[in-house]
Image: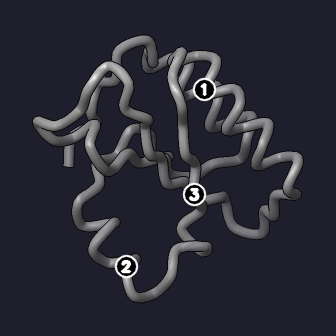
Amino acid sequence: MSAVTIPKLDPEFVRSFCRRRQIAELRVFGSILRDDFRPDSDVDFIATLEPGVRWTLADHLDAEDELRQRLGRAVDLALVGQLKWVIRDRVLDSSEVVYAE
């Protein structure tokens, strides 16, 4: 699967962001990958943390805020482990990798 290009989200920023946040894999899903993505659409991310890493609520909110500021639009950041099993496979199957170690 090839990495998707997101305007205002250059590869060096993504690499640095993921390393600092101890993210092993970062994906996007939702409207950003479809024809219905609009200027006011949010960007949906899914992160897989490195083994043994746990985020606090503050870590999660800080990471989300950093992405929001960088993109200049609303962002939702979910952790793979937080996705309900009912939707996890569907979401992961429809996502695109932005960063992977």
Q: Residue at x 78, y 62 (%)?
A: 53
- The structure residue drawn at horizontal position 33% and vertical position 66%, both measured from the top left corner, is 92
- The coloring applied to the image is one colour
Contact? badges 3 and 1 (CB < 8 Å): no
Residue highlighted by disc 1:
68
- Work out whether mark 2 precedes mark 3 in sequence or the reverse, and give the earlier one: 3
Residue at x-position 74% and y-position 34%: 20
Who comes first in sequence, dot 3 or dot 1?
A: 1
Question: In the shown orientation, is residue 84 left or right of residue 94?
Answer: right
Q: Point out the tag, 1 or 2, that comes first from the N-terminus.
A: 1
- Residue 56 in the image: state x and y as whole percent: 88, 57
In the drawing, does residue 87 fall left or right of residue 24? left
Specify the amino acid type for callout 2: Ile
Residue that mark 3 sits on: 78
Residue 7 lies in what quarter of the image?
A: top left
| Image spot of residue 32 (x, y percent) | 28, 37
| Circle 2 Cα neighbour tier, 10 Å, few/some/many (<14 / 14–19 / ≥20) | few
> Would you place residue 93 above or below residue 14 in this image?
below
Q: CA distance from mark 2 to mark 3?
A: 13 Å
Q: How many marks?
A: 3
Amino acid marked by disc 1: Arg
Horizontal and vertical percent position of residue 17: 64, 29
Disc 1 to disc 2, how far (Cα)? 24 Å
Q: Residue furthest front?
A: 40
Q: Please tell me which residue lies in front, 25 or 27.
A: 27
Frontmost residue, 38 versus 7? 38
Question: Quarter of the image holding residue 63?
Answer: top right
Inspect the image, locate mark 3, and give the three-letter code of the amino acid beneath it: Ala
- x%, y% of residue 4? 27, 33
Q: Is residue 89 above or below residue 93?
A: below
Q: Which residue is mark 2?
A: 87
